[in-house]
Amino acid sequence: LLRTAESASPIAAPALAGSLLAFIIVYLVVFGAGTFYLLRLMTKPPHPGEQGPDPDLPSRASGTVPGPAMAEGDEVRS
Amino acid sequence: MTPDVSLDLPLIWAGLIAFAVLAYVILDGFDLGIGILFPFVRNRRERDVMINTVAPVWDGNETWLILGGGGLYATFPLAYAVILPALYAPLTAMLLALVFRGVAFEFRFRSERHQGFWDFAFAGGSIVATACQGLALGALIQGIEVEGRAYAGGWWDWLTPFSLLTALAMVVGYALLGATWLIYKTSGELQTRFRHLAFFLGAGILGLIGLVSLWTPFLAQHFAERWFSWPNIAYLSPVPLLVLGAAICFFRALAAKSDAQPFLWALALFVISYAGLGISLFPYVVPNAFTIWQAAAPDSSLGFLLVGAVVLLPMILAYTGYAYWVFRGKVGEADHYH
């Protein structure tokens, strides 16, 4: 039988606390920013005659949404 | 269905993990290199082009990091249990840096106003992640203190002049891969600029490979014996000659203004150096502490996992190759794969 205490790795508690704190902060920043951008996009309602993405262009890589869907207050990037 | 027990399963798995790590280093190497080169390119449009050369493939490249780490955990649990606590700080920092870099790919296109910040996160994340990999490599080569079957060193053992040198070598090396990749993928004035950069980075990495290679035998007796004892020295003397040969071919390709060849010769430099590292370490997985056979999981586990690897690895290789084929060719300012 292997107890949990016996299988713990030899890493000191402050090192673990430090890394846990770092992960919490980084995730808060990253997910916070992501939620912020999502909400900003959602404040921009759809309107009649809106043009969707060009169906001839490949549709996946960085920047999943084309220029016209940029958040309000930003310059629209073509 | 159990594979033939006469197979040397630990050796096969060591080969597979070594392959996964090499695939990671050369594939994620050039896309991390693009982040490292960001501070050299201030123009926003040009930065978009740089990002778009790797946008379709970069996340697939990190598959190999997962495969290397997960494979080590499953097949060499003792090595995993010793190496990861020893490298706790640099590996944690590497993961956090990769988080920033990964989201920067998406977010920098989302916000014009915050693009400066996400560009900084992209470059900073790439540089920190690369430096941490170099620190981890240096810490592993210089040796990890082991007592019984556990790590016995301190928190800061990974930080030494040698590991700082390997960190610098890693940053320069990945920047070279990134610059030569961009020579291959871009054109015009931007390409010319990366040709100039690649020349200096190539000279830099050659010097750093030399320094690390000369330092390594002084770290531990077994490295010196491996390379300098007779008859090894006769068998192994082609290794430094191959490095020199690849370097000459690299500079010639650069001077000839070839598109793809500088990248291929930079890859060759990495592969030869990696082979040299393998020659230094083999048969140890934790240098001078555990051999691959001492650290391996039971043969029944290794055999079971090998069946999965035999099915999955060709599939990963096939779709990776296909992705590179689909997105082959030059990337210009008009191409954005939105």
Image (cartoon, coloured by chain):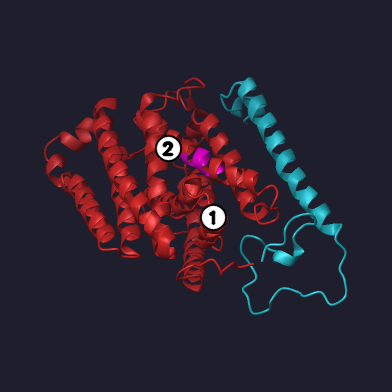
Chain colours: A cyan, B red
List x then y, in percent, for residue B258: 30, 65
Examine the rendered structure and indicate whether residue B101 appears above or below residue B311. above
Question: Residue at position x 49%, y 26% from top?
Answer: B150
Give the overall secondary structure of the magenta segment: helix
Marks 1/2: CA–CA distance:
25 Å
Question: Residue at position x 40%, y 53% from top?
Answer: B179
On-image quarter of the C terminus of chain B: bottom right
Chain for numbered disc 2? B
List x then y, in percent, for residue B327: 50, 70
The residue nearer to you, when weighing B329 against B186, is: B186
Which circle marks residue B47 in the picture?
1
Q: Residues within 10 Å of mark 2 (few under 14, many from 20)?
A: many
Q: Are marks 1 and 2 on the same chain?
A: yes
Q: Which residues are magenta?
A: B125-130
Q: Amino acid at mark 1?
A: Arg
Question: Residue at position x 37%, y 35% from top?
Answer: B166
Q: Which residue is mark 2?
A: B134
Q: Amino acid at mark 2?
A: Gly
- Of the numbered discs 1 and 2, the one sitting upstream in the chain is 1
Q: Secondary structure at mark 1?
A: helix
Q: Is residue B283 left or right of residue B326?
A: left
